[in-house]
Image: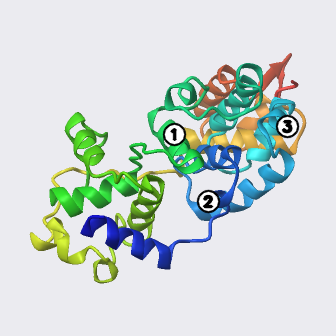
Amino acid sequence: MSALEKEVLSWFEKNKRDLPWRSSTPWGVMVSEFMLQQTPVVRVLPKWNEWLQRWPTPADLSKASTAEVITAWGRLGYPRRALRLHEASKVIVRDFNGVIPSTQEELRSLPGVGEYTAAAIASFAFNQQALVLDINIRRLFARLIDGVEFPTPAPTKTEREARQRIIPNRDAHIWAAGTMELGALICTSRNPKCELCPLMSQCAWRNNNYPKSEQVRKGQSWHGTDRQCRGTIVQALREKTFMNEAQLKALWKEDSQVEKALVTLVKDGLIEKNMKAYSMPST
């Protein structure tokens, strides 16, 4: 075991959060990975528990209606992820006898499962030696190894090859969880807690006196955006069976944004139009 691996695993054993999907089924892991995309843990926890109680297997979710799935997704963000998870459950039942596939190639064949999600499921659900590169892990290694404040917007071939080389042969899934946790709790994007980091003495960024990144990091705006407009419409239709365009426009200051949002939401299958009224999907 390398000194780096030893420090990470020792820290993780003492400081890891008690997250329910860490001791769940492969399906529980998969649901968590869909929910955690661009959504903080504190918001995911209650919804994850609700979903696993209501739909404990892919077969259970596959029988739900689209409207039920979108409504149950609540405010976890744009519910296209919920639709992809719903579609994936049907594929799992149809093509894999209701069992989550274990290879990354098979996982990537599922709706909504890309390279990162496939690697995360393979690692956390099946204890495989997969290259898990979420933003927390990437930021940790960018600082620790590369000596820069932030990683590039997307992993490069060089980055992937370099990170692949340091994955341990044993307990690679714990290594992935430990580095992710260290990035999420200690090596944070803003105000990192360097004095609490077990890798402080090895950190190239710290040893170089914390050089600022040349990349311009854009904050994630929300108020007044198309995303907020779409979310407002979906939430309104969760609470009321039918609403016409005039009623929906009354919820938002810009009519043109509502018109554009309605087109997008219908196209994505998140709402449907019947005559002159909009509603949640009927199937």
- Residue 166's place in the image compared with 1, above or below, is above
Real-space CA distance between mark 2 and mark 3, rounded to the nearest whole angstrom: 21 Å
Disc number at residue 60? 3
- Residue 269's place in the image compared with 138, above or below, is above
- The secondary structure type at the circle numbered 1 is helix
Quarter holding the C terminus is top right
The residue positioned 16% from the left and 63% from the top of the image is 212
265, 5: nearer the viewer: 5
The residue positioned 65% from the left and 50% from the top of the image is 76
Residue at the farthest left position: 208
Front label number (2 vs 3): 2
Image position, residue 267 (x, y; %): 66, 20
Disc 2 marks which amino acid?
Arg
Earlier sequence position, callout 2 versus callout 3 = 2
Quarter holding the N terminus is bottom left
What residue is disc 2 on? 22
2, 52: nearer the viewer: 2
